[in-house]
Amino acid sequence: MANSLTTIKGLAATALGADVIDETKLADDSIDSEHYNDGSIDEAHIADNQVTLAKMAGLARGKIIYGNASGDPTALTVGSANYVLKSDGTDISWGEVAAGAQGTGSDKIFWENGQTVTGNYTITNNQNAMSAGPITINDSVTVTIGDGETWTIV
């Protein structure tokens, strides 16, 4: 019997014992993905850094891939105009741009901020804060100002 697959053409796959054909009997690149069983390629069979961004179709323009709480890649939805990417130290999200100078054309003269504190806030260590007042702090809301920090209301 010659050592070629043509001599066993038509042989039922069940007639071959387990592990009879291994990688030593297959030429490089001789099996195409169409011959793999669905789900037969798992994480252990994909080398590190082999899935490139070019292979990640369907990610909408403006989305960002990040690791979620389970450590799985997740796409962050597209942000809105004048929102920035922010972090709470663990997770990322979109948030409104901090108060900044506004004006007409290139005249950035007016700094605007809200007038009511609606959620608890702690001034960052070794930082100071400034607001244009008057400022109202809602009931059950706390603004924490550490020993080395200052909140100035003008």
Image: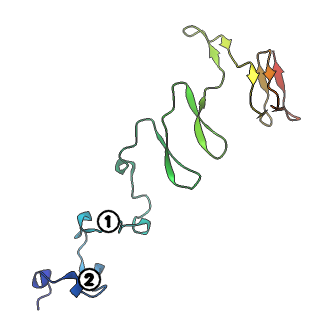
Q: Identify the residue under disc 1.
A: 38
Q: Is residue 91 above or below residue 30?
A: above
- What's the distance in space between the residues labelled 2 and 1, CA to CA? 20 Å
Q: Residue at x 64, y 16 (%)?
A: 101
Percent position (x, y) of residue 22? 29, 81
Mark 2 or 1: in front is: 1
Image quadrant assignment for residue 17: bottom left
Of callouts 2 and 1, the N-terminal one: 2
The residue that appears at 51% across and 28% down in the rendered structure is: 80
Crowding around mark 2 (Cα neighbors within 10 Å: few <14, some 14 to 19, many 20+) is: few
Kind of element beneath mark 1? loop
**Which quadrant, please, contains the C terminus?**
top right
What is the quadrant of the N terminus in the image?
Answer: bottom left
Residue 52, percent from left and from top: 39, 52
Q: Position of residue 68 (x, y in %)?
A: 56, 50
Q: Residue 132 location in percent, x, y? A: 76, 16
Sort mark 1 into few (<14), some (14-19) or many (20+) by Cα contacts within 10 Å.
few
Q: Kindly identify the residue that appears in the image at 78 percent across and 32 percent down.
A: 127
Q: Left or right of 1: which side holds 58?
A: right
Q: Name the kind of residue labelled 1 in the image.
A: Asp
Q: Name the kind of residue labelled 2 in the image.
A: Ile
Q: Which mark is residue 21?
A: 2
Question: Which residue lies most toward the front here?
Answer: 139
Q: Residue at x 24, y 64 (%)?
A: 34
Identity of the residue furthest to the bottom in this view: 1
Secondary structure of the residue carrying tag 2 is loop
